[in-house]
Image (tube, rainbow, N blue to C red):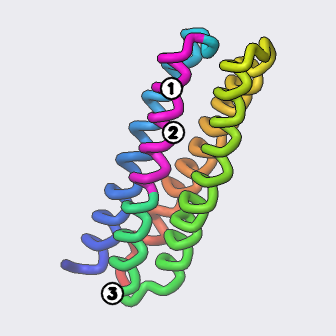
Amino acid sequence: MTPDAVAVAVMVILLFPMGYFTLASPAFLLVKLDIQPVAQLLRGMFNAHFLVMRVAGVIGTLAFLVDGRLVAAIGVGLLTALAIGGRRWFMRRMDDQLSATDAGDTEAPRRLRRLHWSGMLCNAVLLVALVTSIPYVAISA
């Protein structure tokens, strides 16, 4: 692969799960999160997103390292580290709100909705950062 092909492949690998999440997550804004199966489905979508981003990030980081692009590898590595650490933090908070809903806390669905919004916002910011970095990464080494 030429350096440009490696960059394009890594970007596609990273953009696919982020784009899918960007398109799928707003659908949960149309339903109440106090419905247990809906809240569990939202949890599953976030969990899957973090896991897929972890795998995509590791693949992207390794591809850039093999290609000799240290700066790009560091950038993707930071994204991967965020997916690994963020999953633990985010899922713990989501599970807390789901447990609070089960315990009868009427404010828990509202806090879960705020968590949902924050997850979507973080993904959007990272997606914009990734898309804006494409011209810099796609330049041949």
Residue at the spot of label 2: 46
Secondary structure under the numbered disc 3 in the rendered image: helix
Q: Position of residue 68 (x, y in %)?
A: 39, 89
Q: Tally the marks.
A: 3
The residue under label 3 is which amino acid type? Val
Label 3: how many Cα within 10 Å (few below 14, some 14–19, many 20+): few
Nearest-to-viewer mark from 3 and 2: 2
Q: Nearer the viewer, mark 1 or mark 3?
A: 1
Q: Earlier in the sequence, mark 3 or mark 2?
A: 2
Q: Main secondary structure of the magenta part?
A: helix
Q: Residue at x 66, y 19 (%)?
A: 102
**Which residue in the protein does label 1 denote?**
40
Does the stretch in magenta take in 36?
yes
Q: Please, which residue is most extreme toward the front here?
A: 103
Magenta-highlighted residues: 35-53
At x 72%, y 19%, the residue is: 103
Q: Mark 3 points at which residue?
A: 66
Q: What element carries label 1?
A: helix
Q: Which mark is residue 50?
A: none
Identify the image quadrant of residue 35: top right
Horizontal side, residue 24 vs residue 100: left or right: left
x, y percent for residue 128: 57, 49
Helix, strand or loop at label 2? It is helix
Asked whether, in this view, residue 129 is left or right of residue 23, the answer is right
Mark 2: amino acid: Phe
Q: Which of marks 2 and 1 is in front?
A: 1
Q: Distance between the residues labelled 3 and 2?
A: 30 Å
Q: Residue at x 55, y 61 (%)?
A: 84
